[in-house]
Image: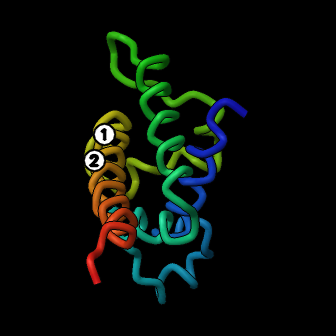
């Protein structure tokens, strides 16, 4: 699947905001912020996964931007995964660039922490 990692991230996003809950469950649920969802996503995976997710997002933006803006294309944005604008301000382009910025920020911090383990002078 060309955008499998984006699809995987969008399902994690849906769980983080309560998209897949019933109305009764949503009433009891406190949605997470995008930064929390990105951190949780990375916690469950690794930096290589983040690298490839960022590449897929950039490819998606490049391939599906039209004069009218960034289009929702299936995959990765099918009927179940086209809910982004219901929870986050801005259009799909704004959302994906925000995700890229958060991924870059977390990637930088975590890669520096990882490398510091090998360069410490004890």
x and y percentages locating residue 86 in the rendered image? 40, 54
Residue 68, position as x, y percentages in the image: 33, 15
The N terminus - image quarter: top right
Few, some or many residues within 10 Å of mark 2 (<14, 14–19, 20+): some
The correct choice, above or below, for 14 with respect to 57 in the image is below
Q: Is residue 11 above or below residue 60?
A: below
Residue 23 position by quadrant:
bottom right
Give me the residue at 37% from left, 41% from top: 96
x then y, percent, for residue 53:
51, 43
Q: Secondary structure at mark 1?
A: helix
Q: Residue at x 26, y 50 (%)?
A: 89
Q: CA distance from mark 1 to mark 2?
A: 6 Å
Q: Position of residue 81 (x, y in %)?
A: 58, 48
Q: Quadrant of residue 119?
A: bottom left
The way the protein has been coloured in the rendering is: rainbow
Reading the image, the residue beneath label 2 is: 101
Q: Which mark is residue 37?
A: none
From this viewpoint, which residue is outermost toward the right?
1
Residue 79 in the image: above or below residue 22: above
Kindly check if marks 1 and 2 are in contact, taking CB atoms under 8 A apart as contact: yes
Residue 75 vs residue 114: left or right? Answer: right
In this rendering, does residue 15 appear at all? yes
Classify 10 Å Cα crowding around label 1: few (below 14), some (14-19), many (20 and above): some
| Circle 1 or circle 2, nearest the eye | 2
Q: Residue 88 vs residue 55: left or right?
A: left
Task: Identify the residue position indicated by label 1 in the image.
Answer: 97
Left or right: 105 with respect to 52? left
The residue furthest front is: 122
The residue sitting at 35% across, 49% down in the picture is 99
Q: Quadrant of the C terminus?
A: bottom left
Residue ID at (39%, 66%): 114
């Amino acid at each position: 699947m060309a955008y499998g990692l984006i699809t995987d991230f969008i399902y994690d996003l849906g769980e983080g905001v309560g998209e897949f809950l019933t109305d009764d469950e949503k009433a009891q649920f406190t949605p997470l912020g995008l930064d929390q969802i990105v951190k949780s996503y990375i916690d469950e995976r690794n930096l290589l996964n983040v690298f490839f997710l960022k590449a897929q997002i950039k490819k998606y933006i490049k391939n599906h931007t039209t004069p009218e803006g960034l289009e929702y294309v299936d995959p990765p944005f099918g009927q179940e995964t086209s809910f982004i604008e219901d929870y986050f301000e801005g259009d799909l382009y704004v959302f994906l660039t925000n995700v890229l910025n958060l991924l870059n920020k977390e990637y930088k911090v975590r890669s520096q922490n990882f490398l510091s383990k090998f360069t410490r002078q004890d």
